[in-house]
Amino acid sequence: MSELQGRVLKNYNGYYYVSTEECIYTCKVKGRMKQNRFSLVTGDIVTFEVGTGNEGMIKNVLPRRNFLLRPTIANLDLLVVTFACVTPDFSFLLADKLLALAAIARIPAIIVLNKCDLADENTLKNICEVYRQIGYEVYCISATERQGIAALKARLEGSICAFGGPSGAGKSSTINAIDPGVQLQTGAVSEKIGRGKHTTRFAQLLPFDKGYIADTPGFGNLMLEELDDKMLVNGFREFAAYEESCRFSPCTHTHEPVCGVKQAVQEGNISESRYQSYLDILKEIKTFQEREGKKL
């Protein structure tokens, strides 16, 4: 029996599909690992034993470079935060939640705005300006019309990346446009509720241009209960330049009388939408903590 090392491409019904340079193995978790609490997700690098055929038993999970809880995936080079400009409408709050999670996990992120051919020009310009002025790359595309696909494909070449965003944003359609051979299932947006159907059920890595590309399940909302106020500040990169002007350290940038971040918002150096997202997320976190505290 030989021991190999590979990357978990997906986890489905208790089986882990692990890729090496030679082939893909269908693996289960070795009994010794089951006796202890373990975390094993798409993107993990594992060692596993192989007998005959393409079946194996996972022995160990190697240390991760990074880990993203939502969508749940490990060892990424890049998170592709994907939103539609319309149908469903762009949500600054949801976009900022994903960007915050990536920043806290120290995973580089870019923004893809799909259905740009259907968007109002001023709306699209406003979204782009908010994020480009704080250093994010923004790609405006139309997956159905193949606008902007070549530039996005070139940006992703050779990287291990995951697409994350709400249902109906066009994650699967964008991946299909980048690589027609993938043929991921796509779904229409519900006219009644204005949200997309969940066509991707689990995260999976697919070979792509010397790297991997992953589609992930969509969502209607994104809760960040695992964060606290100190972690959240690290999710908003533009705050750091103004925190030296805060009278108190640490500063929550909410009620404090002298706050460099609040002053920057008033002067237009930090966008109001980003600051409002910070306040909304902070409120969600505190509400969750208070609710949990009452249960204890």
Image (spheres, rainbow, N blue to C red):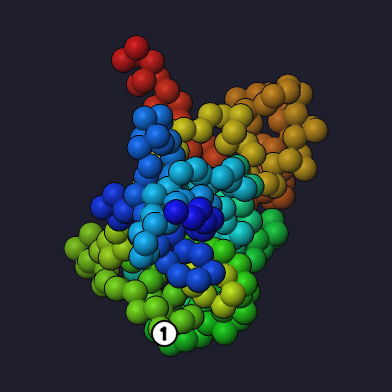
Q: Which of the pair 241/234 is nearer the observer?
A: 234
Query: In the displayed structure, would residue 2 be above or below residue 224?
Result: below
> In the figure, is residue 251 to the left or right of 294?
right
Q: How many marks?
A: 1
Q: Write down the quadrant of residue 151 in the picture.
A: bottom right
Q: What residue is shown at x 57% (from left), y 49% (from top)?
A: 102
Circle 1 residues within 10 Å: few <14, some 14–19, many ≥20: few
Residue under label 1, please give it. 180
* Identity of the residue furthest to the left in this view: 192
- Work out which quarter of the rendered image holds the C terminus and state it: top left
- Work out which quarter of the rendered image holds the N terminus and state it: bottom left
- Measuring from the top left, give residue 222's x and y in whole percent: 40, 46
Q: Which of the pair 44/277 is nearer the observer?
A: 44
* Identity of the residue furthest to the front in this view: 1
Query: In the displayed structure, would residue 67 be above or below residue 53?
Result: above
Residue 81 can be seen in this image: no
* Identity of the residue furthest to the right in this view: 244
Q: What residue is shown at x 55% (from left), y 40% (from top)?
A: 278
Query: In the displayed structure, would residue 159 be above or below residue 288?
Result: below
Q: Report the amino acid beneath label 1.
A: Pro
- Measuring from the top left, give residue 85's x and y in whole percent: 44, 69
Mark 1 residue element: loop
- Measuring from the top left, give residue 4's x and y in whole percent: 52, 56
Q: What residue is shown at x 62% (from left), y 72% (from top)?
A: 158
- Measuring from the top left, give residue 70's x and y in whole percent: 44, 47
Query: In the displayed structure, would residue 159 be above or below residue 13?
Result: below
Q: Which of the pair 183/5 is nearer the observer?
A: 5
Q: Which of the pair 30/120 is nearer the observer?
A: 30
Q: Write down the quadrant of residue 111 in the picture.
A: bottom right
Residue 50 can be seen in this image: yes
Q: What residue is shown at x 31% (from left), y 63% (from top)?
A: 200
